[in-house]
Each structure stands twice: as C-alpha cells, then as structure tokens.
Amino acid sequence: MAFKPITLIAGSKMEIASMTVSMTTIRRIGWSTLLFLLIFASRALLLNRLEMNHDEVWHTWQTGQSLEEAMRWLPFDWPPLYVVVLWVWQNFVGNHPIVMRLLSALIFMIGSAWTFRLGRRLFHTEPAAWGLTLAYAALGYIIFLSTYVRAYVIMLALLPLALYLALRYFDKPTIWRAVWLALAMAALFYTNLTAVIAFAAIGITTLIFYPRQIWRWWLPGTMAFVLAIPEILAKLDLVQRREAGLGEKLPSLPEGLLEIFHADLGHAALFWLLVLVIAVGFVLWKRRFTLRMGLMIVSWLLILPILVYATDGIIGFFTAQYSWWITFGFALLVAWGYQAAPRIGRIGLSLVLIGLMFVPLTRGYRPFDELKYGLPTLPFEQTFSVLATELQNGDVFLVHPDCECGDHYVWNYFESIYFPNPPQHVTEPDGHRRIWYVYRSGQNDENIQRQLEQSYVTGRFIGPWELFFRLYEAPPDRDGILFENGLRFHGAQLLEPDRQPRVQPYVYREGEDVRVRLWWSVDEPLDRDYSVTLQILNELGLFAQTDGAPQPVSLDPTQDASPSQTSQWQPGQYYIDDRVLTMPYPATRLDLMLYLGVYYWEDGVRLQAEGVNPDGLLPLLPIALMAW
C-alpha cells in the first residue's frame, strides 16, 4: 500500500512531462508553419506584379507543345530537366504567367525546407537553422529567382539539399547515402551547367570539414559522373561555342564582385550590409568564431568567385545571373551570427529578415526592373489584361512594321493567354471596322496614322509608351442612310453598362436601361439644329422613348465631345450619340422594335429616308422584354 502514492505521483509527473513535450512540439510546429507561410506570402504577393521577359516566355512557349517537340527545340547550352518540369506543370496546371511563376515559388518552398535541414546539421541548433532559412529566403536575388520562370529556382532548391546530403554522407558513409548524394548532384547538372561551380563549393566545404575523408568522394562522385555522361557527351563542344565568356569584356575583379554582391542583396543592399555587420559582431562578441565555418564562408564569398573570374575566358560564368550560388555564402554568414546572438538578438534579426522579404512589395509594379535582373521586359501582362476587357469580335491589330514590340512567339503566347479569340494581325486598315494600331511613342508611321484618322474615329488608348495600343473605330455602316436634310445615319449599337457591345439576341428585364449608340455624319453643313427620337414599341403601343438634340460623346478620353447642335457639324467627320431608354416596370413579356426618327424641333415633322415607315420611323433592332 505504501507504494501506491509514489506510483501515482510518478505517473502524474510522466503525464505532465508528456503534456509539456506535446505543447512544445505544437508551438514549434506553429512557429515553423508561420515562418514558412511568411516566406511563401512574400513570393505569392509578387506574382501579379511582375512581367515575363523574353527568356521566360521562350521557356513557357517552348514547353507548350509536345514533350518531343520541346526537347527538339532545346538550346545547345540548356540541360533538359527544367524543360521536362515545365512541360509536366503546363499540362497538369496551365500556362498563365502567374501559374508559371507559382511553380517557381513552390519549388523554392521545398528548397526552404531543405535549407532548414541543412542548417540544423551545420550549426546543430534549431535557431541557427531558422536563421539560415530566413536569410536565404530574404536575399533580393533569391526573391527574384524564386518568382522567375527559369531553371535557377531548381538550383536554389537543390543546392542546400546536395550540401546536406554531402555532410550526411561524410558523417556516416553508406552506399545508400552515396546514391542519394549522386542523384542530387546529377539533378543539379541536368538542370543548369552552372552546377559545376556548385559542385566546387560543395567539394571545398567537405574538404574543410572532413579533410581526412575527402577520398570518400570517389563513390558518390563516380555514380554522379555515370549518371551525367549523356549530358556531358551532349555538351562536349560547349566550351568552344560559348566563345570565351560570351565575348563580353570583364570588369576589374573588385568592380565585378561589387556588382554581383549588390545584385545578390537586392533593393535593400544597405540594410543587408548592416545585417551582415551585426551578424559578424555577434560572432566576435560571443567568441563563436570557428576556423572551419570562417573558411567555408570565405570560400563561398571570395575564393570561388575569384576562381570563376580567372576562368571566365573558358566557361563565361562570371556574371550575377550565373553566380546565383554566391547568395548561399551571405545566408551562411547571417546564420553564423544568428547562432551566436542572444535570444533578443535572434528575435530582432528574424523580424528584420522577414521585413526584408517583403521589400520588393514596396516597389510597385515590376519591382525588379530597377535592379536589371534578366532581360528587358515589355509590359505585355499589364497591357493585355486591360486590352482583353476592351476587345470585341472582329477587332484587328495593326502593328507598326518598325515597332520593337516583342518577337512573334511572345505575341503568340500572350494572345493565347488573354484572348479567347486572338485578333487577326493586318498590314493595311482597309475593310476592318475596329483597328488597334500598335506602335512605340515616337516611332509611329505618319502615313498610316493619317489614313486611320481620315476614315476612323480615334478611340481610347492602352499601354505605356513602349507598347502603345490606340483604337481606331469605324461606324457599323460606312455608307449609311441619308436623310432628306443631309444628315447621314451610320448605324446603331446596343451597349452594356460598361460601354461594351451587348450580345445578341437583345433581351432586357423590366425596368432595365437600354443604352444605344448612334453614329452620324453630314454630307454638307446643315442650317438647322435637328432632334432625334428613339422609341421602343410594337403594335400594342409605345413602351420607352427619348427625344432631343444629339448627345455626342468622345471615344478619345483626351478629346472633348462634339457640339450637340447639328448646325455646327462638319463633313468628313463621324459624330457619336449615346442615349439611354428605360424599360417599363412592371411589364409583361413582349417582342419589341427599336425605332429612330429625325425631326426639326420647331415643327416636329419627321424627315424622310430610305427604309422609314409611314410614321417616319426607321426600324433599327429587335428587342425582347422579359418579365414574370
């Protein structure tokens, strides 16, 4: 009996300990989930603020066909893995620019998880692992690459994985660990040829941490080499074809390094310098300096870049774009300081790094343009998303022949994304009612523009100066119907509230507004101011009506509307008259007709024209009224 209370107490302690462990685990999972969500949010919120450049469009357009055709179009210096990934993604998810960028963000999230695992193995503490993960995710160039539709994002994900597997293998060499390391290295090589520099960085790291076991590379190295043989054979002549550093003159080493470092740090380079100084300060303050970690960071940030610079005439990799792997050196330096920092210092660094992840969101649309990452970008996504709301069936594009408005495959891709029925491209305006003239500011053809302005009404414009769309619109009926006073009617359109054409058949609800656009011109100046009547009626009587002088509107937002007095109208010009009628409420279901009449306001006598009925009204369009 004496042992029972002790048993109960011991049991209670075990339950309390179990609950404590459980709560600790829950808190860790909660914080981990929050941090990963913040990393993803910093990318997801950028997806609709970017523009695909020509390289990204080429990748997407190339992989939008069969896999066999995509591989046939593979450039000589591109390994195939990323093309296969893109092809699978497009066929299962889609090829909208935001969807394509989402793939990069998701791949990077996998890489972030691998970075955390690497941080735990390198620094042996979970806080330092989070420091490495957050720093890697917050670097400006990493943010860009993790939303960029290029192969580099796979490299960003595979690099920490390969390094983690290498350290894991050298800690306890086994055949299966060698296999996984070989597979990761082969995947790097089949993704991008700059993997050879990543291999050197991983090799130097293992030499620093395992100098006496470096010979163990023979097993994973041999397996990786065997896996890579097909790609190696396919790229044997690449060195000669790259023409010694792509033929570009190298800057001095300090200038080149500063340019690459600035690109890696991104928009907040000055803040990053402060973070790096604070990280070094924590290491020195807490006396956490270790020779191995110091050598590793110096190797990633200085020794390897100098070697790449020295061999640029052979491999041509000394550019910010090809030096993506340097970013990991900065992340390592921050994680080192993160490990040494006190708890309050780690919290402060975490908040700063999280803030740095969201800096590009403060730079508006196309935030990376100022950093000159990638190729120059034309705003197709921004322009076509607006243009898609304005296009009508039958619209055509007339692109200025000398306009530097993107390659044909770029137009083909974006038109297939934004326009269900892509407009036809024409070289002459004849015979088309609505023409979108495309040119760059200062490069428009005056002859084409003069011809358009003589035969069309100048409408709205869309796009910035480098991709400028101007609408030129002709009336529904160019010949028109001549009234006896010299006023010529060129047709009517029924419009939606947003001024887009209403789809036939024309069906309205009781109490709904009927918006009508009328097109006019005069053969010669008129001596009177005439009025127009619009009526909706049938054999049962009149149901809606509007009367009065024309109510001209301007389709060009930069121009004022024409005068409403017809005596001021001039030949050779179209006049657009917008009116609104309201269906009766309540009502019954009816089949109606829209009629037009022209009269002089003093006597009310309707003028004659071809097609008018005995009441002097011209039938225009049939309308159905629906009611309960």
Image (spheres, rainbow, N blue to C red):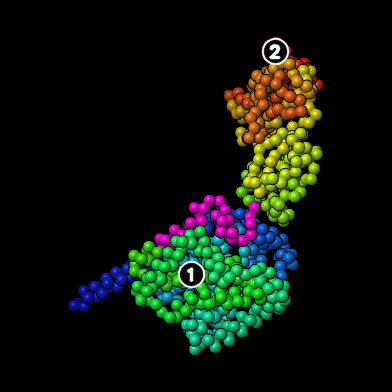
Extreme residue toward the top, this view: 603
280 horizontally vs 581: left or right: left
Q: Position of residue 65 (x, y in %)?
A: 72, 61
Residue shown at 64% from the left, 67% from the top: 82
Residue 266 lies left or right of residue 2; in this view the side is right
- First in residue order: circle 2 vs circle 1: 1
> Label 2's element?
loop
Quadrant the N terminus occupies: bottom left
Kindly identify the residue that appears in the image at 78 percent across and 40 percent down.
Answer: 447
Task: Give the residue at the far left of this rendering.
Answer: 2
Magenta part of the protein: which range?
350-378
Alpha-carbon distance for marks 2 and 1?
Answer: 84 Å
User: Which residue lies at the image location 80% right of the left edge and 39% below the top edge?
Assistant: 430
As drawn, 227 above or below 571: below
Horizontal and vertical percent position of residue 401: 76, 49
Classify 10 Å Cα crowding around label 1: few (below 14), some (14-19), many (20 and above): many
Q: Is residue 51 above or below residue 302?
A: above
Q: Is residue 374 above or below residue 601?
A: below
Local SS, label 1:
helix
- Where is residue 264 shown, x and y percent of the image? 53, 65
Rendered location of residue 540, percent (x, y): 68, 19
What amino acid does circle 1 point to? Phe
Q: Which residue is mark 2?
A: 604
Q: Is residue 354 magenta?
A: yes
Residue on which the image places disc 1 = 330
Q: Is residue 385 above or below residue 65?
A: above
Q: Which image quarter: residue 53? A: bottom right
Q: Quadrant of residue 612?
A: top right
Q: Is residue 100 magenta?
A: no
Asked whether the viewer can see residue 102, the reply is no
Q: Which mark is residue 49?
A: none
Q: Residues within 10 Å of mark 2 (few under 14, many from 20)?
A: few
